[in-house]
Amino acid sequence: MKKYVGSLAMFLVFEAVAVSLWLTKNNLFYLLNFTYIGGCIALGLALLVSGKPYARRFVQLAVGSYMLVYLGLICRENMQIEGFWYYLFLGVFEAATIHYAVAKIFGPLLFGRGWCGYACWTAMVLDFLPYKTPAAPRKKIGWIRYVVFIGSLVFVSSLFLLKLANLERIMFRAFLAGNAAYYVVGIVLAFAFRDNRAFCKYVCPVTVFLKPMSYYSLVRIHCDEDKCIHCGKCLKACPMDVEVNKESRKRKNGTECILCYECKKACPVKALR
Ligand code: SF4
Ligand code: SF4
Ligand code: SF4
């Protein structure tokens, strides 16, 4: 039972968020929403520690498709970065602002880039492509993420400055167009660079929040460097080019870790935990 403590703790964290938001905002939706997401993540973690190879994909599909189809398409909430700016400028702590606060800004202090490994609906599709580990060295084009980040901010600011009518409808259309663009660019880059996660490494604007916050993450992969025999198997297994056979938080690409645990599975001497 001891091995399931982590999944229970994660469920309790989500349940605390669920109950707090339910009571403070007097809206049952928050209780159901965060209970569902926390339940899926806790179940996925339990499957992971039980050694089930499909555990991560289960959570990705259960949470990612719920957020894309139910929250995005049915409830018409723009959950992309443009939606975050939109609700922030409106001054309301709703939908995308809550989602960003929990999953992408403050949550990463606890669970790093767990969002990227277990819940993102863009990566949910990209992870089905054939290049699970990068077939070529990393490119020095990570600056693109900052251009996209600033572009999203300029786009939403312009909507307010121009005082356009029907902002809700524009934001919903932006959500549809933005997601379509992410999928097309993500798939093209994956094949061009033979790397499923190329979009995450170079283009995704959300990483501007995720990377600095996850540097301090409580949950991280630890390496016992005394046990390591420098076989390099973990480095080959990593989809994000993390120098995981170093213990330091300053390890190369350390803030790219999506907690997929492929490195741990590959290590022959159990140096990673
Ligand atoms: S980097 Fe962006 S696209 Fe990739 S998994 Fe994270 S949030 Fe999703
Ligand atoms: S393989 Fe290891 S270091 Fe690489 S992203 Fe997955 S958990 Fe992180
Ligand atoms: S797989 Fe294990 S032993 Fe090999 S380099 Fe990585 S940490 Fe070291």
Image (cartoon, rainbow, N blue to C red):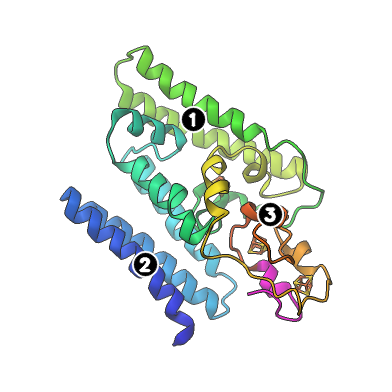
* Mark in front: 2 vs 1: 2
Q: What segment is highlighted magenta in the picture? A: 262-273
Residue occupying image coordinates x 37% and y 69%: 11
Residue occupying image coordinates x 70% and y 75%: 224
Q: Residues within 10 Å of mark 3 (few under 14, many from 20)?
A: many
Along the polypeptide, which appears first: circle 3 or circle 2? Answer: 2
Residue highlighted by disc 1? 177
Up-down relation of residue 95 to residue 151 (above or below): below
Which is nearer the eye, 114 or 166? Answer: 114
Image quadrant in which you'd find residue 230:
bottom right
Q: Residues within 10 Å of mark 1 (few under 14, many from 20)?
A: few
Residue highlighted by disc 2? 39
Three-letter amino acid code at the position of disc 2 = Gly
Residue occupying image coordinates x 57% and y 30%: 148
Q: Which mark is residue 240?
A: 3
Could you say whether the residue bearing mark 1 is in a helix, strand or loop? Answer: helix
For the residues bearing labels 3 and 1, Cβ distance under 8 angstroms: no
In which quadrant will I find the N terminus? bottom left
Query: Cβ(mark 3) to ligand 2 < 8 Å?
Result: yes
Name of the residue lying farthest toward the bottom? 1
Q: Is residue 48 magenta?
A: no
Please give left or right for residue 97 compared with residue 241 in the image: left
